[in-house]
Amino acid sequence: MKFLDLFRRKKSELPLTPRPLLVNPPPERVLLRRAGRLMRLYRAVAKGQETPEIKAEIRKLRLLVQAEGYLVDNEAEAAALYKQLGGA
Amino acid sequence: MATTFNLYDQWRDHAADPARAAAVAGTLKMAIVKATYTVDQNLHDFFDDIVAASNEVVGTGYTAGGEACATPTWTGPDGAGLLTYDAADPATWTQNAAGFSNGRRAILYYDTGVSTTSRLVGFSNDFGADLGNLAADFSVAFNPAGIYTAPR
């Protein structure tokens, strides 16, 4: 019984931190969101998690970010843009 | 505006068990619900808890069940050990004069096509006002830092 209680407590303490959603976000928040997503997708690719869907999303996001005047071709550039725009 | 996003306890319980987490099936989607939906963070586990009482919004431009959030991914750990769960944002609900105007929360879930097996992930706080695509486009985006994170 004590073991079960411990197990339950451990599970309830699993540190998952949900992040606030953006409702009707202004353009600058949309750009920041895209930079953050691109950074993580490039990171996934670097770790061997590349899939056709991830490649397609990178292509789409890269074009959207480029339309705002930023060239982002890899994780480092995406991370730099993310920080430049105020991402932590 | 930013609105707090919360995880259902049943999802946290599921995510804590590697075998069950790996068995989660379906397409990650975001649905919009009306003020009639009363959240039970502790007990609600499947999408039937939401659609049973017609809590989902209805209107032109809104497909029942919501919009897909493509390519859900776990990435990391980064240099600080942070793991991040994230996905593509749902498509914008385009303005339509016959659209919905009574959206109060966003619901994230894995749609299997059957509401009784479509596992709930999380829900937003009440938007604080009725929102929708009746007068203008309506969009909900995930946080720039991801949907949720797991620190070291």
Image (spheres, coloured by chain):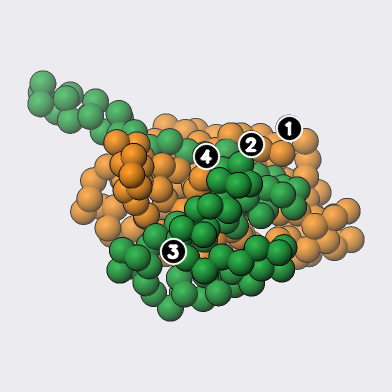
Q: Is residue B11 above or below residue A43?
A: above
- Label 3 secondary element: helix
Q: How many neighbours does mark 4 have within 10 angstroms: few (below 14), some (14-19), or many (20 or more)? A: few
**Can residue B94 be spotted in the picture?**
yes
Please report whichever mark, 4 or 3, sits nearer to the chain's N-terminal start: 3
Say which of marks 3 and 1 sits in front.
Answer: 3
Q: Is residue B129 above or below residue A66?
A: above
Indicate left or right for B109 with B139 as reference.
left
CA gap between label 4 and label 3 equals: 17 Å
Task: Quarter of the image for the N terminus of chain B: give it.
Answer: top right
Q: What mark, if any, has residue A42 been given in the picture? A: 3
- Label 4 secondary element: loop
Residue type for callout 3: Tyr
- Identity of the residue drawn at 37% across and 55% down: B74
List the residue tagged with mark 2.
B3
Residue under mark 3: which chain is it in?
A
Say which of marks 2 and 3 sits in front.
Answer: 3
Q: How many neighbours does mark 3 have within 10 angstroms: few (below 14), some (14-19), or many (20 or more)? A: many
**Marks 4 and 2 on same chain:** no
Q: How many neighbours does mark 1 have within 10 angstroms: few (below 14), some (14-19), or many (20 or more)? A: few
Please report whichever mark, 2 or 1, sits nearer to the chain's N-terminal start: 2
Residue under mark 2: which chain is it in?
B
